[in-house]
Image (cartoon, rainbow, N blue to C red):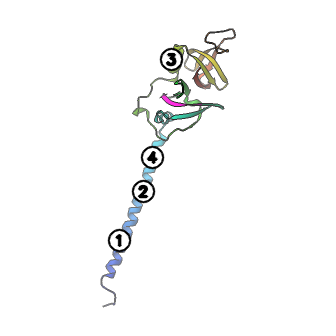
């Protein structure tokens, strides 16, 4: 006999196999985690801001629009290119083109893609035409400043606003019809 117990050689092989199995299992777990992270990143890359806003449900958000306009409220409706916020205090709705949003406070990471929800099929122009039909006095915020008035007409890429410079409900001297390019529109707020 060689002096070593007969069971020591098989025990060494068992430890080597156990070590190899442990390394293999660890490697498999790391590979699965990496693949899962890649899939998550790829899925996230397909989400739009509208999807994220739909995922916010009724949560309160603060939208920073333009250089100095801050709008707070809960998401009431989301279209492909716009979001409507409802003010929790008075229930009034503001319509904001997504292109005008600089950043958002309080937006959760959860999203709801358009296919998973009853998304408003209305475009921004349709929503603005609804406001025009209501003859509501609104404040139209643009990149050039704000206008108080009524939306008179909505075209494909512009909105005509009949200004009410004193904020009165009826036209006064000094009222005029102003045309706002849709690309300059930041928000339409209830007055």
Q: Give the farthest residue toward the front.
A: 89
Front in this rendered view, residue 113 or 169: 169
Check if residue 77 falls in the magenta segment.
yes
Q: Say which of marks 3 and 1 sits in front.
A: 3
Q: Earlier in the sequence, mark 4 or mark 1?
A: 1
Give SS at disc 4. Answer: helix
Magenta segment boundaries in residue numbering? 71-79
Q: Say which of marks 2 and 3 sits in front.
A: 3
Q: Earlier in the sequence, mark 4 or mark 2?
A: 2
* Residue 144 in the image: above or below residue 12: above
* Residue 17 in the image: above or below residue 164: below
Q: Identify residue for label 3.
A: 130
Give SS at disc 2. Answer: helix
| CA distance for labels 4 and 3 | 39 Å
| CA distance for labels 1 and 2 | 21 Å
Q: Identify residue for label 2.
A: 31
Specify the label residue 40 is tagged with: 4
């Amino acid at each position: 006999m060689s002096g070593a117990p007969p069971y020591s050689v098989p025990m060494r092989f068992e430890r080597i196999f156990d070590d190899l199995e442990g390394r293999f299992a660890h490697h498999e777990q790391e590979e699965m985690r990496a693949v899962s992270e890649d899939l998550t990143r790829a899925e996230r890359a397909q989400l739009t801001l509208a999807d994220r806003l739909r995922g916010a449900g009724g949560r309160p958000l603060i939208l920073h629009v333009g250089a100095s306009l801050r709008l707070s409220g809960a998401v009431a409706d989301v279209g492909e290119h716009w979001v409507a916020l409802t003010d929790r205090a008075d229930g009034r709705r503001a319509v904001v083109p997504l292109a005008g949003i600089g950043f958002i406070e309080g937006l959760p990471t959860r999203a709801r893609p358009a296919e998973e929800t009853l998304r408003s099929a209305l475009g921004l122009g349709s929503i603005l035409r609804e406001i025009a039909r209501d003859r509501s006095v609104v404040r139209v915020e643009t990149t050039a400043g704000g206008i108080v008035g009524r939306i008179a007409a909505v075209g494909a890429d512009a909105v005509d606003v009949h200004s009410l410079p004193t904020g009165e409900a009826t036209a006064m001297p000094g009222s005029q019809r102003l045309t706002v390019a849709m690309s300059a529109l930041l928000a339409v707020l209830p007055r």
